[in-house]
Image: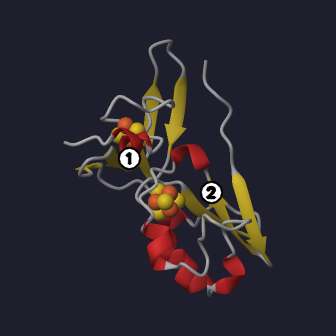
């Protein structure tokens, strides 16, 4: 049975960072790029008021898992970011298989789920959220 998706929003004025923890593959790219915004040792761990909207958008586009997105005035991420593009598959060293593009994923029971923008699939076998990566490849020391 599918677990309910957890979605957290960090809002300031009309801009909100949307974080889906189940999708995070713990690449720490956000922490390296904007440490003044993303600090896992603090609560809340995202402080969007510490960077400009443009800087936040540019960084969110680099999140390799799709765990980060944004909303403006209760609208979903701008169309250009979710528009259908050619599907691209990228293997992340010692990590997941990243599929770029909009997807429909059907599990063994026939349940279908829509995925947008980018989806990280587990290659190490240790994820507790299969078929998706949950960052467990780091703790099991997956190589490949
Ligand atoms: S996957 Fe995205 S949200 Fe998770 S640590 Fe990496 S950049 Fe941050
Ligand atoms: S590849 Fe990330 S949890 Fe398996």
- For the residue pair 97 and 32, the one nearer the viewer reads as 32
Q: Residues within 10 Å of mark 1 (few under 14, many from 20)?
A: some
Q: Nearer the viewer, residue 87 or 134?
A: 134
Is ligand 1 less than 8 Å from the beta carbon at label 2? Answer: yes
Dot 1 lies on which element?
helix
Q: Residue at x 22, y 43 (%)?
A: 143
Q: Where, by quadrant of the figure, is residue 103 drawn?
A: top left
Residue extending furthest toward the left: 144
Q: CA distance from mark 1 to mark 2?
A: 20 Å
Q: Is ligand 2 closer than 8 angstroms to the Cβ of mark 1?
A: yes
Q: Is residue 62 above or below residue 76?
A: below
Q: Quadrant of the N terminus?
A: top right
Could you tell me residue 9's position as x and y percent? 73, 60
- Visible residue check, residue 108: yes
Closer mark to the observer between disc 1 and disc 2: 1
Q: Earlier in the sequence, mark 1 or mark 2?
A: 2
* Circle 2 Cα neighbour tier, 10 Å, few/some/many (<14 / 14–19 / ≥20): many
Q: Which residue is mark 2?
A: 19
Q: Position of residue 82 (x, y in %)?
A: 49, 58
Q: Nearer the viewer, residue 45 or 3?
A: 45
Q: Which mark is residue 138?
A: 1
Q: Position of residue 132 (x, y in %)?
A: 44, 36
Compared with 26, 95 (above or below) is above
- Which SS class for mark 2? strand
Which residue sits at x=53%, y=54%? Answer: 67
> Do residues under tags 1 and 2 come within 8 Å of each other at their CB atoms?
no
């Amino acid at each position: 049975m599918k677990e309910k998706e957890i979605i957290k929003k960090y809002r300031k004025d009309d801009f909100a960072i949307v974080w889906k923890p189940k999708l995070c593959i713990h690449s720490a790219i956000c922490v390296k790029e904007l440490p003044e915004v993303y600090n896992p040792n603090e609560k809340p761990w995202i402080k969007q008021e510490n960077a400009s909207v443009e800087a936040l958008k540019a960084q969110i586009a680099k999140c390799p898992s799709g765990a980060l997105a944004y909303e403006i005035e209760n609208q979903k991420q701008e169309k250009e970011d979710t528009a259908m593009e050619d599907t691209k598959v990228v293997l992340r060293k010692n990590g997941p298989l990243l599929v770029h593009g909009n997807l429909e994923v059907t599990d063994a029971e026939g349940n279908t789920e829509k995925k947008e923008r980018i989806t990280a699939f587990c290659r190490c076998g240790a994820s507790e959220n299969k078929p998706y990566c949950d960052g467990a490849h780091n703790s099991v020391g997956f190589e490949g």
